[in-house]
Each structure stands twice: as C-alpha cells, then as structure tokens.
Image (cartoon, rainbow, N blue to C red):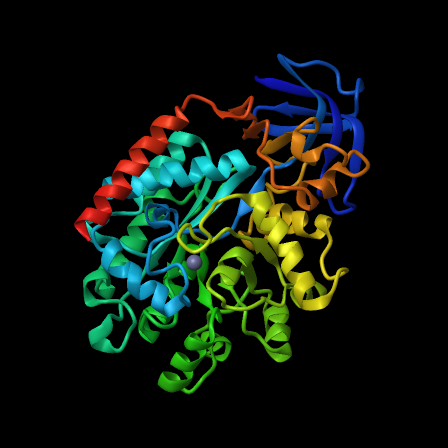
Amino acid sequence: MRTLLIEPISLLVTMDAEGRELRDAAVLIRDGVIEAVGPCGTLGTASEVVDASRRLVMPGMVNTHHHLFQSLTRATPGAQDVKLFDWLIVHYPIWRHITPTMITISARLALAELLLSGATTVADHLYLYPNGARIDDEIQAAQELGVRFCPTRGSMSVGESRGGLPPDGVVEDEDTILRETRRAIESWHDPQPYSMCQVAVAPCAPFNVSQELMRESAQLARSYGVRLHTHVAETLDEEHYTLERVGLKPVAYMASLEWMGPDVWWTHAVKLDADEIALMAETQTGVAHCPASNMRLGSGIAPVRAYLDADVPVGLSVDGSASNDGGHMLAEARLAMLLQRVDRGAAALTAREALRMATVGGARVLGRSDIGQVTPGMAADLIAYDLDRHELAGAQADPLAALLFCAPTSIDWSLINGRFVVRDGALVGHDLQRIVAEHNQASARLRTLA
Ligand SMILES: [Zn+2]
C-alpha cells in the first residue's frame, strides 16, 4: 500500500461543488486515489511526504480536444493567415506523408508540452491514417509519458471526388474505418474508474464524412457504451456546406443524425443561435472550447457565457497544434477568459470560471466523474505552481486568479494517479531535449516528403 501526504500546501484549490480554496492545507493519497483533504497537520503521516509550501495545488487540467500530429506542421508558411478551409487545403498534402513513427514522435512532443503546462488528461482527435498509421501509434506515446488519455478514433471518408474537402489520398473507406474503430475500442478502451485510456468514436467533421458513416459511428459507439466526438459549427463555410448539401444548418444536421446527447461532445460550436444553445442544454451535448484556434483562424467567438448560463457542459481545448500553435493550458484558459470579454464586457467570464472549465468542466465533457477535483475518491491527478515564480510576483492577494491574469507560467510538479510525471519543472524519466530534437527531425523530413 503506497501513501503520499502533501503538506503543507499554501493554497489548495479543490474545484469541488462549493469551489473551496483552502490555505495551509493537506492532501492524503493512497494507491493513486485521494483519501482525505483537510487542514495541515490533521491527516496523519504517509510513506512519502511532499512539502508544498509556497505552492498553489489544484486538480490537473483536462484538454478536451487536440490533434497531436499537427505539432509537426506548426506555423506552416502559406497557412498562417487563412481561414479554416484554406488552412486545411494547405495542410492535407503535407499530412498525407505522415508515417506511424511520426505519429508517435509528434504525440510525445505535444503531450510533453501539455503536461508541463498543467494538463493531466488529454483527449486527442486523430483523423488521418496514412502509410499504415494506427491510433495505437499515439497511445504508445501517452503510455510512455504516463498521461491519462482519451484517444478518439477519427476518420474522413468523403474526398474531393465525392464533393468533400480533403484530397482522396487522405480519406479511408468506410468499412476500414468502422473495423479499425471497433478494434481500437476492443484493444484499448478501459471503462473502469481511474482508467488511463478511454476511447471515443470521432468522424472528423460534416464536410468530410458521409451521413451513413456519421449514423453508423453513432450506433457503433452506443453499442460499446463509448462517447462520440466531432467538429461542429466551427465556421460559416461549414454552414454553407451543410445547407447546400442537406438543406440543414450544422446543428440541425447533427441532431438529424442522432449526434446530440450526454454521450456526445462537439468541438468549437462557435456558430450557434439561442434555439440551438437551448437544444445543446436540453440534450446535454458537451462543448470543447478552443479560443486560440478560433481566433487564429478568424472563425469567431463561441457563445461560452450562454453555454455556462444554460448549463451546457463546457471544457477547454488547445485544439491544434497547427492552428494555435501551442499546447499550453493556462494560456488557453486565459484566452477563454479574455475572448468572452471582447464579446460581452469585462464581467463576461472570471478567472475561476475559466479554470473550472479547464478542470471539472473538462472532466464532465469527457464523462469522467473520477477526475477534475481534489476531493476524496478522485484520482490523485494534481498540479502545483510555484508562487515565487517571476510571473506571479506582486499577485499574492489572489494567486489563483493570477494564474490567468498574469503571463502563463509552467508547473512545478504534477501527479497522475498519485505518481509524479513532472517534478522540479521537468518530465520524470524523459529527456525533453531529446524529444524536441527527434520531433524537429521528423517535422523537417515531413516537409521534404511533401
Ligand atoms: Zn480540431
């Protein structure tokens, strides 16, 4: 039996239902699960004690949408100043040369970047499988780094010759997609509490997947009891596409395909009107909010304030990594807070609301009741920030809000299932410089192939 006591903690942010923030607190962890939370000196002792004085400790953050492989093509010339459809048209011919090894290498880099920024759970949307690539290639990287992972088996089936956006060379046939999705679930999905890997089913978007595949994917996911994920209502181009082809706006289209419900989360959800937001709330369809990507591509401002007021589940996502082009959870939460203010004034979203979205909100979107809070019974996924960092100097009156009001900082340490994955600001057991060098080589090679 392994026990870990973290005390004293200068400031413990629980993200529990009451939003408790405790000064001079302690957390006791047993076998990777939080056993007790209380004042310093009241929880007994443990086999290992970690001093967290001058630290802010909070739940590890949950990234609800990503494309890890895109870290190979950040800041691509020709795709820096264009909207989504044109951005995709520049990238597809490059991405078709990605190899299985490149999938692993890019996932390793992008996951390391997220971990160092405070993520402990990551959902990834891998929708391209060229040259024999499989979802297993990114799961391997997540296992190596020890991150809690939600790989979503993406797909594209409608290429240019059938009226879709991607070239035919990057789409798969639908039998292969369904067979591989089944295999991914049967090989990797663990539905148990504290699971390190939960697979979801994720056809890419309304403009590159057929109606039949959307329907069959929903049936398949529900037959296994796994979640459904896709891109919806990101841009006006998408709205024109679905209106032209099926006579419906994206939300109505997805509703007609049974793609709404408490087991579904959409990413972006930018272009929704009040009736559509009400439908999201009624069906409890979740949202992965990607402020940096929406700003970078000029897609618009998602109605996050309205979602929260209507009790639509909302999590935070870095999207990317070629439309962000970073993977920093605090930077993303900061943008979420600021972007709502651009739209609706200075009181539109508080720092605490944005950080709840990044933690307990993300857990809800992924259907996880075992992460996102520091309360007894939860997985011991915790992160700590050093309150003496230069970025936080002068902000001691409210260090939690300072995490978003000040420039984004990196974590001091993080625990996943009670084990350190980051300590003293560095990955445990991994050489970051080597991961970066390997990644840069793969990225350069990809560009020579394209
Ligand atoms: Zn995306």
Q: Position of residue 173 (x, y in %)?
A: 21, 64
Q: How many marks?
A: 0
**Left or right: 251, with 130 as reference point:** right
Task: Please indicate, yes or no, whether residue 292 appears anywhere in the rendered image.
Answer: yes
| Res 418 → quadrant | top right
Does residue 58 lie above or below 204 as drawn?
A: above
The residue located at (47%, 22%) in the rendering is 428
Given residues 153 and 68, the one toward you in this image is 68
| Res 304 → quadrant | bottom right
Given residues 28 and 20, the one toward you in this image is 20
The quarter of the picture where the N terminus appears is top right
Q: Position of residue 314 (x, y in %)?
A: 60, 58
Rendered-image quarter of ligand 1: bottom left
**Left or right: 79, with 368 as reference point:** left
Task: Please indicate, yes or no, whether residue 265 appears anywhere in the rendered image.
Answer: no
**Left or right: 59, with 241 as reference point:** right
The residue located at (50%, 35%) in the rendering is 115
| Res 287 → quadrant | bottom right
**Left or right: 184, with 317 as reference point:** left
Q: Position of residue 3 (x, y in %)?
A: 61, 18
The residue located at (68%, 42%) in the rendering is 406
Does residue 275 lie above or below 13 as drawn?
A: below
Does residue 271 lie above or below 135 as drawn?
A: below
Given residues 239 and 299, the one toward you in this image is 299
Q: Position of residue 91 (x, y in %)?
A: 30, 59
